[in-house]
Amino acid sequence: MGKHLLVELHGCQADLLKKVEYVRDTLLGAARACRATIIDSSFHEFSPFGVSGVVVIAESHLSIHTWPEYRYAAVDIFTCGEVIKPEEAVDYIGTRFRCRNPSVVEMKRGVIPGHVGKLPHKVAAQGVKAAQGVRDAHQELSLVY
Amino acid sequence: MGKHLLVELHGCQADLLKKVEYVRDTLLGAARACRATIIDSSFHEFSPFGVSGVVVIAESHLSIHTWPEYRYAAVDIFTCGEVIKPEEAVDYIGTRFRCRNPSVVEMKRGVIPGHVGKLPHKVAAQGVKAAQGVRDAHQELSLVY
């Protein structure tokens, strides 16, 4: 199965939620903090303020949407496999946004009838084939473990 | 508040979950089906099989992870604003993957104390400022409404 943490961050420091660079660095740092393998990321800053972003990891994804005007951010950390420690990503993000009490709901995804154990994550030694959607570009990523 | 649908798709047609192009077209089609404004997308095909992808929309995001070997896909549809109809995206995806009974859990995100109504989505007339993370490239997107 996959492990999906839905993280509600209220009471953040508002200005930290406004800058796309800071939000991006936070989510990429969180991915590293939980030992994920980063494949790609996409972050966007909106007017008048607010940031949305996703980090695709070999073990699924992290996402964030910020509403600085409400000092609020919604974060999702969806992971699979045995190695990842998503709780460490939550701690990292909470610290970066000065959020004292992130609330976390854990959802189990992909409970397969008759299957015992966790769903495998998707890293394969021979590399990862990547396709970019609206950018209409293809690239090959070679990952070394 | 934001509306977050966690969609479990069991019993899909396995070969439809394997091809990154088909999965990407499905998720982009789903975004259009629910009238979302597509900002960016990123899809990746793994070895031996499985696809992960995200579509960043002005109203938040859609994501998917597929395990063809279990005929299973996990989809998230996170939207905000008044216009989007995420249920139509669920119907679209279920049909594309030949999944007869998608199960859907709805989570309300960003319930702000004292705030009445839904969180605004982030589209602004003056355009959207975009920053790409690990690709380390910046671009300006001009959206017309």
Image (spheres, coloured by chain):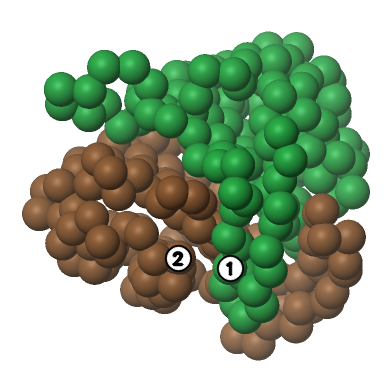
Chain colours: A brown, B green
**Disc 1 on helix, strand or loop?**
strand
Q: Is residue A63 left or right of residue A87?
A: right
Q: What subunit carries mark 1?
A: B
Q: Which mark is residue A84?
A: none
* Residue at x 27%, y 64% (from the top left corner): A16
Crowding near pointer 2: few (<14 within 10 Å), some, many (20+)?
Answer: many
- Say which amino acid is labelled 1: Ala
> Would residue A15 be found to the left or right of residue B124 on screen?
left
Q: CA distance from mark 1 to mark 2?
A: 7 Å
Q: Give the quarter of the figure containing the C terminus of chain B.
A: top right
Q: Quadrant of residue B47?
A: bottom right
Residue visible at 67% across and 64% down in the picture? B140
Q: Which residue is tagged 2? A: A20
Return the residue nearer the eye: B64 or A12. A12
Please report the residue visible at 49 percent of the width from the left and 45 percent of the height from the top: A2
Rendered view: B52 above or below A6: below
Percent from the top left, x then y, of residue A56? 59, 61
User: Label 2 amino acid?
Assistant: Val
Q: Is residue A40 above or below residue B56?
A: below
- Which of the numbered marks, if any, corresponds to residue B131? 1
Tell me if residue A33 comes above or below residue A63 in the rendering.
below
Q: Position of residue B9 (x, y in %)?
A: 66, 26
Q: The N terminus of chain B appears in which quarter of the rendering?
A: top left
